[in-house]
Image (cartoon, rainbow, N blue to C red):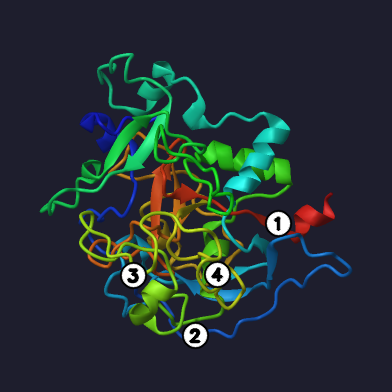
Amino acid sequence: MKLSNLKYITAFLILLGCRQEPKRNAPSQDGLNLKPQTTKLVVSKLPNLEPPVDMVWIKGGTFYQGALPEDSLAMQHEKPRHKVTVNGFYMDMHEVTNDQFAEFVAATNYVTVAERAISWDEMKKQLPPETPKPHDSILQPGSLVFKKSKSSLPNLYDYSQWWEWKIGANWRHPNGPGSSIEGKGEYPVVQIAYEDALAYCEWKGRRLPTEAEWEYATRAEKINDIYSWPGGLEQLSSHANTWEGEFPVENKLHDGYERRAPVKSYPANAFGLYDMAGNVWEWTSDWYHINYYANVSEIEELINPSGPEKAYNPSNPYVQEKVIKGGSFLCSASYCASYRISARMATGLDSGAEHLGFRTVLSTDMIENK
């Protein structure tokens, strides 16, 4: 668990919201072939298989993963583009909802990470040596909740300015005590740690998507597009739930929502997938390594990549992080614009927040092995 109201813990434990990337040398793009490739079918749907409810078949194919050279908002860890082929798979057409997660909890009596007692012995393993123990009154179950700023913030690097630790915040009370998911069964479930997402996947007989699968599904054969919808930024408010206005002071609500929106509130992409941009960030199964794209860029073609073997982030050296994709309702054009197809961020395994959820996938090998 993380305690965002303690700056020394926040600085080492969380990478949440849209955080600007630290400056560093750009990796070389020498030898990278950016010529568009013809998408090819790699794996067909299994014959006579009834499509899983609320899932979409994503036919296999080849694409270039990563930011386009002309994307002026791209961060260095989204570069360079590299050629990837993925097999076909089924993917949830929308993020896992409160109703779906509630069904899982009712069937299994599962208790999420945000609802469990906090172990200081476990927490301090992710902190610098000699970090002092917080008071027991703070070491209580809870999670991270967004808070607006009352005035402009000259420094948007310090993300603790808009996150606060709320004791009692969890998937049932996503904004803290007093908040509720009653009447919001079709909203995406949030305050979900990586372990929670895996537990749900196991119950459903599914798994989390790899980062490559997620980006391929979002791109939906749009080889040279920055956004997953037509019309670019001029159509942002009608295609994604994001922050419009001065972040984190005022959200002008052009898209209709202050925080999370019900799933399927905006048009689906060309593959029939909803909310692949904005609304809530989504877990993938890949470890986050800041140099991963640079390391694989010289490989001619990656086949079904599952990411690096271990995590590495010099800005969060004590935390094991996974890649998250898709951006959230907090993503702003003036800050990080993570509603772009190539956008990627990272967060620790036990991080929960009110803008972080997930969706599942089902690959043909999983079906055949049942």
Relative image position of residue 109 (x, y in whole percent) = 67, 28
Residue 193 is situated, as x and y percent measured from the top left of the image, at: 50, 39
Can you identify the residue that label 1 sits on? 362
Residue 254, numbered label: 3
Viewer-side residue, 308 vs 141: 141
**Residue occupying the point 45% across, 61% down:** 326
Q: Is residue 98 left or right of residue 7?
A: right
Query: In the rendered image, is residue 71 in sight?
Result: yes
Upstream in sequence: badge 4 or badge 2 = 2
Identified at 39% across, 61% down, the residue is 257
Residue nearer the viewer, 97 or 292: 97
Q: Earlier in the sequence, mark 1 or mark 2?
A: 2
**Dot in front, 3 or 2:** 3
Looking at the rendered structure, the secondary structure element under dot 1 is strand
Q: Which mark is residue 316?
A: none
> Vertical placement of 326 versus 113: above or below?
below
- Which of marks 3 and 4 precedes in the sequence? 4
Q: CA distance from mark 4 to mark 2?
A: 14 Å
Q: Report which residue position mark 4 lands on.
A: 216
- Between the C-alphas of marks 1 and 2, the distance is 28 Å
Considering only order in the chain, which callout, 1 or 3, is on the residue closer to the N terminus? 3
Q: Quadrant of the N terminus?
A: top left
Q: Which mark is residue 36?
A: 2
> Measured from the top left, where is residue 81 in percent x and y?
42, 72
Is disc 1 surrounded by few (<14), some (14 to 19) or many (20+) residues within 10 Å? many
